[in-house]
Amino acid sequence: MTARSSTDANRVIPEATVARLPVYLRALTALADQGIRTCSSEDLASAAGVNSAKLRKDLSYLGSYGTRGVGYDVDYLRYQIAREIGVTQDWPVVIVGIGNLGHALANFSGFRSRGFRVVALLDADPALVGQTVAGVQVRPFDELEETVRTNDVAIGVIATPAVAAQDVADRMVATGITSILNFAPAVLAVPEGVDVRKVDLSIELQILAYHEQRKAGGADPATVVGADGGAA
Amino acid sequence: MTARSSTDANRVIPEATVARLPVYLRALTALADQGIRTCSSEDLASAAGVNSAKLRKDLSYLGSYGTRGVGYDVDYLRYQIAREIGVTQDWPVVIVGIGNLGHALANFSGFRSRGFRVVALLDADPALVGQTVAGVQVRPFDELEETVRTNDVAIGVIATPAVAAQDVADRMVATGITSILNFAPAVLAVPEGVDVRKVDLSIELQILAYHEQRKAGGADPATVVGADGGAA
DNA sequence: TAGATTGTTAATCGATTAACAATC
DNA sequence: TAGATTGTTAATCGATTAACAATC
């Protein structure tokens, strides 16, 4: 097994692979919790809901962390993926918009357990300011800049109504935030270098509705295949 | 072409295109709200955050709904896309798991406005049953089958903890639900013909963290080694 | 060694994009 | 007609997958 050389740091990992690494990480954690110390690519692929060829190809972008004829050491691979993603470090996060969704996000346990620390909850509504949600006091949106500076926040979460989203994004970018997770149903314009990921409930439902409509009326079952190539 | 009901109902629309149609729909609605009656592919693409070649290619899978030299009639195109997706009809939806997230989903206004009607909120916890959330009484999970049958539900939303998700999915599939939107951080195994879409907050954050990490340093990966050091 | 399983290759498939002929 | 803009083509790019040589 080779150690990482300095040139490894330049390797480009395809986006599709990056998006699956957290899935593998979670599957490895599940295996570890079951007391499993070693797994084959077949085992892990099955736990992650992908095929094993894809899994091995994905892992090959990180390095050679398996042993031919044997498989992967669960804890070792888990650590390597965690390090690659960056979840071995602490990520301060600010949530803007503390409505129903913001509440749910603030209480979401998956944050803490993966190195994401909610350092502030902000809302423009004075009626919400001062309330305590998930052990954190809601502060005025105006304190965004101070919050980001003080806590070295790099990731912002937008859970406001759509109309406010672009303004919030602009302010976030101005304060130096370079990664945004947007729950508002709006297209955000941001400068290059700023990453935006979008979580959009009604879009997901509409995609399901499209396929559902085709199943219902379509008559031809052979044409309908799950988007992810489903397990079973 | 294989034998199938009518006209061009069997043309296959690429998944990537299907996923963007709801975005176009929203952008068209925004344009209509501004009183804009006609738009070019450039206008619409810009409002949707994609490039115009991609937009035109996507729309070409639906048919020829534009006019060369002129552009698209906003209302007409909006209707065509809505019909294609299926949001001109009513989709009864059941939400299982009424914790913080389930609450937020139940209150989500985007449901109703797009033809999705929450017909039931179910939870296995007796303490929640009977409470009213967003005007709907929470019912016991056991009533799933009856609910689905009575209301002809085709889409189920899972907002339970991860451990319960597969069981809920199995029960949903058994009752005849063929589309599932899963918010639980778990990989679901479902039979062919059942569509699952996943919304996973911590995965989105981890993807952002990966890119953030690369922006921040690019420098020295050795710096952050977890307390558990190495392959622990 | 014999069996098992990785890491990689190469073929295929699907998505994106620029360019432009068609045509309003 | 002249200008504008669609719908389509074809080239390119990226992702998936089966197959298998490498090797434990």
Image (spheres, coloured by chain):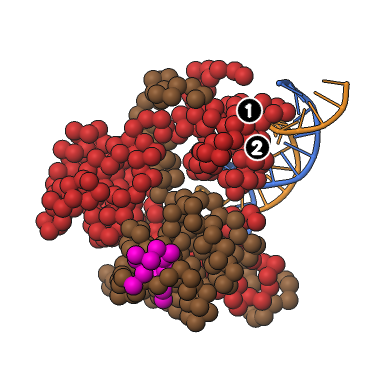
Chain colours: A red, B brown, C orange, D blue
Give the chain of mark 1: A
Q: Is residue A123 left or right of residue C5?
A: left
Observer able to see residue B19: no
Q: Quadrant of residue B126?
A: bottom left
Q: Is residue A88 left or right of residue A133?
A: right
Q: Earlier in the sequence, mark 2 or mark 1?
A: 2
Kind of residue at badge 1: Gly
**Number of residues whose C-alpha sits closer than 10 Å to that of mark 2, classed few (under 14), some (14–19) or many (20 or more):** some
List the single residue furthest toward the front. Answer: B126
- Name the disc covering residue B14, or none: none
Q: Nearer the viewer, residue C17 or A195?
A: A195
Q: Position of residue B51 (x, y in %)?
A: 44, 54
Kind of residue at badge 2: Ser
Q: Nearer the viewer, residue B208 or B64?
A: B208
Q: Quadrant of residue B29?
A: bottom left
Q: How many marks?
A: 2
**Number of residues whose C-alpha sits closer than 10 Å to that of mark 1, classed few (under 14), some (14–19) or many (20 or more):** many
Q: Which residues are magenta?
A: B119-130
Instruction: State if disc 1 and disc 2 touch (CB < 8 Å).
Output: yes
Report which residue position mark 2 lands on: A41
Marks 2 and 1, Cα distance to the nearest angstrom?
9 Å
Up/down of B212 relative to B21, above or below: above
Report which residue position mark 1 lands on: A66
Residue at image point 31% right, 55% down: A104
